[in-house]
Image: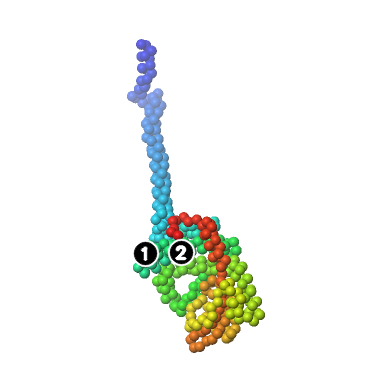
């Protein structure tokens, strides 16, 4: 019984003296500090908790945002202005060819243009046409990606001056003022001038690459030159080279015909003289041109074209041999 009483006494806390004296001041100070600690540490704990909660909420919001963005582009295949802006800021891929990513923004550059054309024609609800232009647009984006890869490997670059010169030539060829030309681009392609510059840069890049890598075409050009030096006509060369070249004879057009520079080149020749090889604005091959006749506002000329085939041949080989990965579903 005595032990139990002693234990009970030990459990009971000692009461502080009611009066503060020199002897009891230390006990009172400890009591005040203990009460302060009860308020201080819970507040620190609450702050840490708020920081962790804020970080967690931010991460969740970011994950939701990324998930919605991914679904918007890769599931719903959104082509809206917002989706286009996102892809222009973030280098997101739409496909991959031979290890090179085709950018989603390039795909939308072409696809949004084709959709706008369909809409203006009242055909936006025709799913077969939408699918056709979708496939065409993704092929263009893949061509751009492959051209970029080959350009990098062959140290080929296209600067802004070349792009501006090409646009200027097209404008002069169409005989339109600057404002009228911009309106035509907007009405027909539904592009801004910046978007046109981007598309023209890709066109020039592909052309430069195509001319560089096509050894077959270069050999045919050398062969054609040799035959011309032997005094052979374009018809003779066409017959001898067969389907390796593409001839057109006795073509009559107006003197202001817009054909990438062939008419202008023919008009600069004396009758019967052959000029070439010429690279036109179309950038699809080498042309050997001869003037047949000029009467009034009509010019008659013939040409033999040495086509570029290597780029398309390589591109189609990669597509047909599972070297292309698509990150969105397409209907083939």
**Residue 84, located in which quarter of the rendered image?**
bottom left
Label 2: element kind = helix
**The N terminus appears in which quarter of the rendering?**
top left
Which residue is drawn at the image coordinates 50% and 59% (left, top)? 102
Between 77 and 315, the one nearer to me in the picture? 315
Q: Where is residue 55 in the image (x, y as percent from the top left)?
A: 42, 45
Q: Earlier in the sequence, mark 2 or mark 1?
A: 1
Disc number for residue 136: 2
Q: Quadrant of residue 279?
A: bottom right
Q: Position of residue 296 (x, y in %)?
A: 49, 88
Position of 46 relative to 15 (above/below): below
Q: How far apart are marks 2 and 1 (CA)?
A: 16 Å
Of 243 and 166, the residue lying toward us:
243
Residue 230's place in the image compared with 46, above or below, is below
In the rendered image, is residue 265 in sight? no
Q: Can residue 254 be seen in this view?
A: yes
x, y percent for residue 43: 38, 38
**In the image, residue 198 above or below residue 76:** below
As drawn, the label of residue 206 is: none
Q: How crowded is mark 1: few (under 14 residues within 10 Å), some or many (20 or more)?
A: few
Tell me what residue is drawn at x 63 percent, y 73 percent.
222
Residue for badge 1: 126
Q: How many marks?
A: 2
SS of the residue at dot 1? loop
Tell me: 300 left or right of 65. Answer: right
Q: Is 234 situated left or right of 29 in this image?
A: right
Q: What residue sits 40% from the left and 46% below the top?
A: 60
């Amino acid at each position: 019984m005595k032990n139990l009483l002693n234990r009970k006494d030990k459990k009971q806390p000692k009461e502080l003296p009611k009066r503060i004296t020199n002897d009891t001041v230390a006990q009172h100070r400890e009591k005040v500090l203990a009460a302060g600690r009860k308020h201080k540490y819970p507040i620190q704990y609450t702050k840490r908790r708020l920081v962790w909660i804020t970080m967690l909420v931010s991460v969740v919001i970011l994950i939701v945002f990324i998930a919605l963005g991914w679904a918007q582009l890769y599931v719903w295949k959104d082509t809206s202005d917002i989706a286009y802006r996102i892809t222009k800021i973030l280098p997101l891929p739409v496909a991959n060819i031979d290890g090179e990513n085709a950018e989603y923004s390039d795909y939308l550059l072409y696809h949004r243009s084709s959709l706008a054309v369909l809409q203006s024609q009242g055909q936006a609800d025709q799913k077969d046409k939408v699918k056709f232009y979708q496939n065409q647009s993704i092929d263009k984006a893949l061509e751009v990606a492959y051209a970029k890869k080959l350009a990098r490997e062959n140290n080929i670059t296209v600067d802004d001056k070349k792009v501006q010169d090409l646009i200027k030539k097209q404008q002069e060829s169409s005989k339109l003022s600057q404002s009228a030309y911009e309106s035509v681009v907007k009405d027909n392609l539904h592009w801004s001038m910046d978007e046109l510059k981007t598309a023209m840069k890709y066109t020039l890049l592909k052309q430069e690459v195509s001319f560089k890598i096509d050894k077959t075409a270069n050999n045919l050009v050398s062969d054609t030159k040799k035959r011309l030096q032997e005094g052979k006509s374009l018809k003779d060369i066409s017959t001898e080279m067969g389907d390796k070249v593409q001839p057109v004879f006795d073509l009559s057009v107006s003197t202001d015909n817009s054909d990438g520079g062939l008419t202008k080149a023919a008009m600069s020749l004396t009758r019967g003289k052959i000029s070439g090889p010429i690279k036109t604005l179309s950038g699809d091959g080498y042309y050997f041109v001869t003037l047949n006749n000029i009467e009034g506002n009509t010019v008659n000329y013939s040409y033999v074209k040495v086509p570029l085939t290597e780029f398309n041949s390589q591109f189609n080989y990669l597509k047909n041999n599972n070297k292309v990965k698509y990150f969105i579903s397409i209907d083939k």
